[in-house]
Image (tube, rainbow, N blue to C red):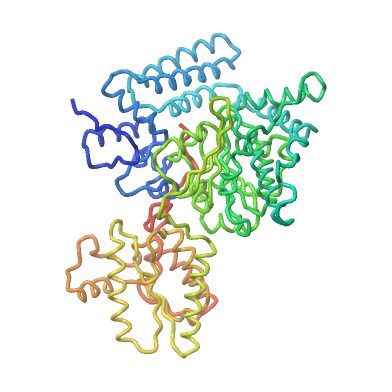
Amino acid sequence: MNRLPPIERVSDLRLGDHPAFDAWFYSFCAENNIEHSINPTGVASPEQLRFMVALDERQVYVPASDLTFRELVASYHLRTFPPRVRSQYAEAWRSIIRVVRREKDREKRRNMINYCRHRFRGCLALGNILPSRLVKRLVTTLTSHFDTPDPWLEERFFFNEGLAEFLGSQAFQEALGRLPEGLCGKGDIASLRRALDLAELTRLLHLAGRSHSTITRLIHACAAGEKGLCALPDIFAGSEAFTPQVRELLGDPDNPRTFLYVCAVEGGLVLDLRIIETLLRLGHRVILALKEAPIYYAPTIGDMERDPLLVDNLPESHILKVPATSKNELLRRLREYRLLIISDGTGERLNLYRTSVTFARAWKESDAVLARGRGNRDVLLGTSHLFTRDIFCFWEEGGEARMQLKPHAPGVRKFSEYALTAKARTIIKSMRAAKNSGKAVMFYSCIIGSIPGQTATAIKVAETFVRALRERLDGIFIINPAEYFEPGMDGDDLMFMWEQVQRSGLINIWRFQSMDDIERSFALMGRKVPPIWSGKDATFSTGCTKEMRIALDMQRTHPELQIVGPGPEKFFRRGDYGVGKYFDATITNANQDFI
């Protein structure tokens, strides 16, 4: 029997090092429906996943903790499940039975239990199904047979109502407003104000880290305490210990940040919004990610329109329902609204393979991710993988509230909107200077990353040809995109930057790379054209296709603009960028499969 390699850290695994593991891992991805090649419309592409997880080309990612994955792999050899996974499956079965019990008809309930038992045993026999995916699969099937597709809706509303009363109570307000010890008499007014804001946010995060049952008990205890039936509990006891971590999360107070806020399965959206209000007041921007489909008490995107408590008290915001929004649209909405509400595209515990394009782009455009609840903690902190953004989790463990900040992967660079715009303005400035000196400006649209694995060659091809052009042409200032390419920039970043340059109105000649250009470049390099490059030109590039649309648009307002190269009609067989790609691989999640 082929044995799988020993696993300590999932982040150390690479495809291609062990054939037996490669086969097992492909089967694992297929059974859990997280294999992009099998379900390209419902599962994130490797490029989309790299928006969120710091991965190299052969590295694998698992949407679970290292310990859970290690025990699943171990079960392959043991033919039985180790304790942790066994307990997770047991909890999964209990949670499924709790859903079944919501069915009032005894006969239907018995049929549901028999169905779940059959499916559950079948999945256990496979031995490679993640407990969270098994729960998602069966719960989706069960709820589809209920009279209401969201059996937890009223309970979520009731919990939010109780939370709202609690947050507005005198006991809560007094506890939240109590001055931290040793604060008075230190520093100036601005420093004191920052310290008070920090204390308030830390206390709210500490409370939000509590489980559903703990918060419910606290609500009841406070209500009884206000009536004099018992002593008032210390709501924020121990929260001050987490102040340094929250201070690190917020960073420089003079440089507001953008946070992606991921809610917990335990619910309590009213408390999440109270935290978000504090972040907004401190000058930050927030993208709130809710569930697309119901899963237990987790707030859904539909709650924002159905829960009257939320409708009446929601801060100024915008609900972005598009599952695959563009970078330009997302940034435009963030400029207009400091609170943006999106769906993560799923109806399950956080699973980055299944999240929407909009969620992936929101992650990429944020500075840090705030993730509430034990489930999010297991996925984000329980893994040895590092992420592209700082991760701040707050949850309950052993009856105590916990917080932890996980820094982003070293070397990961965020190209902010400001940085990309500044780069575009620098290029525009050089173009304007060239025109003022009497030169014509030529923009060269060429293949950069449209051929997978050929980016370095594409840059060399473009540089070689443009160098020859500059030697032949007089009085021409040529913009070659290959000269401005930086490692880490993806198609989103490049197109956002170049569109600003291209719409500046300073381009006189827009030249699109032809097949002859490519053949001449290889000849100048003393090489034959490789098969993968034969017959290629700008029409092969999705980026160039978008640029042709821009060129034609600019030509309507600037008739003097000359467009040289393949005719426009040859371009429009191309679609759009996939997330993070330079080549034509449109991702459409409009009909995303929730199973």
Tell me if 456 is positioned left or right of 44 in this view. Answer: left
The percent position of residue 376, horizontal first and vertical second, equals: 51, 35
- Image quadrant where one finds the C terminus: top left
The percent position of residue 338, horizontal first and vertical second, equals: 65, 53
The percent position of residue 355, horizontal first and vertical second, equals: 48, 41
Q: Nearer the viewer, residue 110 or 463?
A: 463
Q: Is residue 305 positioned above or below 57 on the image? A: above
- Image quadrant where one finds the N terminus: top left
Residue 207 location, quadrant: top right
The percent position of residue 85, horizontal first and vertical second, equals: 40, 23
Q: Nearer the viewer, residue 191 or 175?
A: 191
Q: Nearer the viewer, residue 211 or 40?
A: 211
Q: Nearer the viewer, residue 288 or 259?
A: 259
Tell me if 63 is positioned left or right of 3 in this view. Answer: right
Task: Residue lying at the far right in this picture: please name it.
Answer: 227
Q: Is residue 194 positioned above or below 4 on the image? A: below
